[in-house]
Image (cartoon, grey):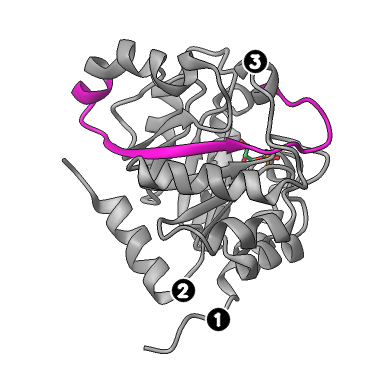
Amino acid sequence: MKQFIYESLLAKKRRGQKSFAVLIDPDNVNAKKIEELTSLAVSAEVDYLLVGGSLVISNHLDEVVQHIRSHCSIPVILFPGTPSRVSRYADGLLYLSLISGRNPELLIGQHVISAPAVRKSGLEIISTGYMVVDGGAPTTVSYISNASPIPADKNEIALCTAMAGEMLGMKLIYMDAGSGARHPIREEMIAAVASHIEVPLVVGGGIREPEKAYLNCKAGADVIVVGNAIEKDASLIREMSAAVHSVPVKKQ
Ligand code: 1GP
């Protein structure tokens, strides 16, 4: 099985090098927007492009991914609401299990149904312990998942959930306050989780300011994901990417 993206994430984590990922919702882009975003992403040295959302309504995932691929060589990683939404044109897939919830369908049920198609896709599969944290308002992900998020101040619940996910074999932990969250995840919770796991930690949801992205990285996030704020103002890509990449790497 392919491991290119994951190996690069691990290598970066060892060096303390942080990554910036832009989330593209296929429902909210057209060809012109994709060209604008990819050109900004290339010049800002964005590390990954995530494609997906909890509610992909449109039916042009393949087209969106192919269009992105034809404009840049930044790895495209699918971040699907359900594991069956795959496009073989991407590079990788975050194979999410909603470990913060108690909805069996999102923990394993949908995976069983989609496993043959996912395997056949040939994508790099990155098993991901997905943790939704309360972002101050109901988000699409909390509604669709029919699962309560982890309360924003319950650091112990978050760290025990992440530890369990890691010990169950998940290769990545993704803490998400949900797209457009009113409050992004607090640094205290990120630090608590980061200090208890060894796998890379992805953080997203409601990050609007580059300073917040920087502080999240300092607290222990390895990858910062921003979608909503960039949809509103694409020029933020530059500042966000610069902030994430300004975190000093470890001396070898
Ligand atoms: C959502 O973590 C992502 O799942 C990104 O959130 O759209 O709020 O940046 P935003």
Residue 128 in magenta? yes
In which quarter of the view is residue 176 placed?
top right
Q: Secondary structure at mark 1?
A: loop
Circle 2 is placed at which residue position?
16
Q: Residue at x 68, y 55 (%)?
A: 189
Q: Amino acid at mark 1?
A: Pro
What is the spatial separation of the Cα atoms under label 3 and label 2, in whole angstroms?
36 Å
Across and down, in percent, residue 146 comes to: 64, 15
Q: Which mark is first along the chain, 1 or 3? A: 3
For label 1, the residue is: 248
Q: CA distance from mark 3 to mark 1?
A: 39 Å
Left/right of residue 24 with respect to residue 69 in the rendered view: right
> Is disc 3 in contact with disc 1, using a CB cutoff of under 8 Å?
no
Per the image, the residue denoted by label 3 is 146
Q: Nearer the viewer, residue 19 or 191?
A: 191
Task: Classify the position of the N terminus by image quarter.
Answer: top left
Magenta extent: 118-140
Residue 83 magenta: no
Indicate the amino acid at tag 2: Gly
Amino acid type at mark 3: Asn
Q: Secondary structure at mark 2?
A: loop
Apparent side of residue 237 relative to residue 105 in the rendered image (left or right):
right
Q: Position of residue 80 (x, y in %)?
A: 47, 26
Q: CA distance from mark 2 to mark 1?
A: 8 Å
Q: Are marks 2 and 1 in contact (CB under 8 Å)?
A: yes
- Mark 2 vs mark 1: which is more N-terminal? 2
Indicate which disc, 3 or 2, sits on the residue closer to the N terminus.
Answer: 2
Towards the viewer: 124 or 43: 124
Residue 122 figure quarter: top left
Q: Nearer the viewer, mark 3 or mark 2?
A: 3
